Image (tube, rainbow, N blue to C red):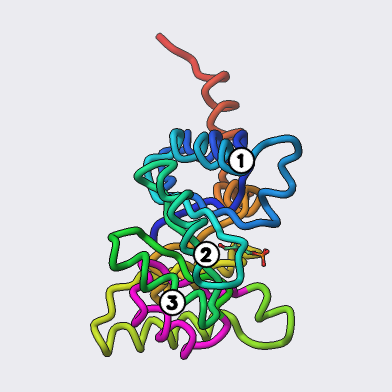
Amino acid sequence: MKFFIDTANLDEIREAHELGLLAGVTTNPTLVAKEKGVSFHDRIKEIAALVPGSVSAEVISLDAEGMIKEGLELAAIAPNITVKVPMTPDGLKACHAFSKQGIKTNVTLIFNANQALLAARAGATYVSPFLGRLDDIGQNGLDLISTIAEIFAVHGIESEIIAASIRNPIHVTEAALRGAHIATIPYKVLMGLTQHPLTDKGIEAFLKDWESRNEA
Ligand code: E4P
């Protein structure tokens, strides 16, 4: 499973990128809105220049024509832009239009397996099931990852599954086990994955022993 970061914040992206493991970035209108005083296109351009992998930028229009217009503008910003469209009939139409032009797509706001299958068949490069939001309403988000992964494997579907709306480290481990190709993770959760109290304790003990060594 590869790691994307789910943010539009440049400092967070820069720091995560420095870890050397970042394969891409996802943004959404909410995340972009948190970044005060920056133009959407400028920020996407900055992110795409910083991270060589896929950078998802989401359209706002609700009709296919508007999505296609917006998506073409976004795709023109940089070669590594992935156009993110919502899982609606118009989103599927736009997804298909982009896929015919070789433009990468991420179909977002997926909450069941049929939506994922439809998106894949419309040519989606990525499908994004939202784990946390399903958990929030008492449905098992991780089970959805397993189901989608199984369906894609049975039918030889090449669209990649992005485990989205990740809230905690268990989501990450389980998404990997259940066959997600990618997890897109908020900065705090991503950095939290590096930590374990026994790692800190171990470093502390090593340093203490090192200081007390008795060299000849
Ligand atoms: C994915 O592409 C979305 O940006 C994201 O994972 C949404 O997560 P949330 O439910 O925490 O807003």
* Amino acid type assigned to the residue bearing label 1 in the image: Asp
Q: How many marks?
A: 3
Q: Is residue 99 left or right of residue 40?
A: left
What residue sits right under mark 3 in the picture?
A: 93
Taking depth in this image into account, of 144 and 44 the one nearest to the observer is 44
Q: Is mark 1 within 8 Å of ligand 1?
A: no
What residue sits right under mark 1 in the picture?
A: 200
Query: Alpha-carbon neighbours of circle 3 within 10 Å: few (<14), some, or many (≥20)?
Result: many
Identify the residue at image location x=53%, y=51%.
5
Residue 4's disc number: none
x, y percent for residue 49: 44, 34
Query: What residue span does the magenta drawing correspond to?
Result: 111-131
Identify the residue at image location x=50%, y=37%.
45
x, y percent for residue 136: 73, 78
x, y percent for residue 24: 44, 49
Query: Alpha-carbon neighbours of circle 2 within 10 Å: few (<14), some, or many (≥20)?
Result: many
* Amino acid type assigned to the residue bearing label 3 in the image: Lys
What residue sits right under mark 2 in the picture?
A: 67
> Where, by quadrant of the figure, is residue 120 drawn?
bottom left
